[in-house]
Structure formats: structure tokens, C-alpha cells
Image (cartoon, rainbow, N blue to C red):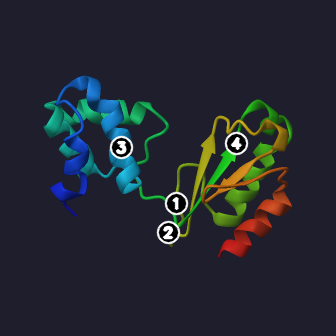
Amino acid sequence: MPLEHHEVGDIFARYAPDRDSLIPLLQDVQERLQYLPSEALSAVAEYLQLSENDVYGVATFYAQFRFTPPGLHHIKVCEGTACHVRGSGHILEAITRTTGIAPGETTPDGRFSLERVACFGSCALAPVVVVDDKVYGRMTSAKTQRLIEESK
């Protein structure tokens, strides 16, 4: 599906067409579209007069960029030190068992996507899981599995 110019044209208008605009432009396009489809990368490359390889190389370098649409329910698991020490790895494994997806993936039905996050800054609540921008603190594998089941 080709990217329609009106979907991101107003975003492009806010940036000078030079290499310094690449990362903030990609961030804004992803915020609008929820991910970076290949058509968006091509449009950014054309606007900034860069090769598609250059744009793709920068986008794949940074973990913040997604190349597949997120699920209806976006699950993020904190892997900061406090969360890690308190079992976030077990929580991530439980989510993978329950949903059948690994971090960076979306379920085939588009219901869930899973992401690892370096730190949410909510260490007092560790381990932390965020679902659809709602923070859940002091999570366990069992609590997380119930949360996912309730979201189905």
C-alpha cells in the first residue's frame, strides 16, 4: 500500500530537507503511523535527498523504531536494573509463552505486540509492565498472564 503524501506531508513541512532532520523526522512519522513502513522510509529518503539505504541504516540502528505495526495491545516490559533483579526476565518469558511472540514481534491476529524497554524510571514499582500506556507495578509472571488473558 503506497504511502499517501497527505498522511505525512505536514510532518515533512516542519523540517529542513537535510540530514540533520533524519532522526526527528523518523520519530514524528512513526508517532503518526505507529511504525515505519517501507513506503515511509522511501518518502523520508526522497524528501531529505538521501539514499533509502542511508535512511534504513539509521532507522535500524536505533531500537526505538518499529518496522511492523504494533498490536492492538502494546506490552512493554522494563529491563532496567531494579526490574531485572526483581524478575522481569521471568515476566518476559511468561508473556512469550502466553502470546507466542518474542520481543519486537506482533501476534498473527494483531492483538498483542511485545517490547523490551531499558527503563521506565519507576524503580520503586519494580518489576514494571506497561500495557497500552498503563503502568502495572510489582508484577509477577502469574499477574502478567492474568492481565493478558483479561485483554483477549
- The answer to whether mark 3 and mark 2 are in CB contact below 8 A is no
Name which residue lies at 48% across and 39% down. 64
* Chain-order first, disc 2 or disc 4: 4
Name which residue lies at 24% across and 57% down. 7
- The answer to whether mark 3 and mark 1 are in CB contact below 8 A is no
Position of residue 114 in the picture relative to residue 60 (left or right): right
Horizontal and vertical percent position of residue 81: 77, 30
41 vs 101: above or below:
above
**How many C-alpha atoms fall within 10 Å of the one at disc 2: few (<14), some, or many (≥20)?**
few
Q: Which residue is mark 3?
A: 28
3 vs 2, front mark = 3
The tag on residue 78 is 4
Name which residue lies at 35% across and 34% down. 24
- The answer to whether mark 1 and mark 2 are in CB contact below 8 A is yes
- The answer to whether mark 2 and mark 4 are in CB contact below 8 A is no
Q: Which residue is mark 1?
A: 106
Q: Which residue is mark 2?
A: 110
At label 1, which amino acid type do we have? Thr
Position of residue 59 in the picture relative to residue 43 (left or right): right
* Chain-order first, disc 3 or disc 2: 3
- Give the spatial CA distance, label 3 vs label 1: 22 Å
Q: Secondary structure at mark 3?
A: helix
Horizontal and vertical percent position of residue 83: 79, 39
32 vs 51: above or below:
below
132 vs 19: above or below:
below
**How many C-alpha atoms fall within 10 Å of the one at disc 4: few (<14), some, or many (≥20)?**
many
Q: Secondary structure at mark 1?
A: loop
- Give the spatial CA distance, label 1 vs label 2: 6 Å
Horizontal and vertical percent position of residue 48: 17, 32
Q: Secondary structure at mark 4?
A: strand
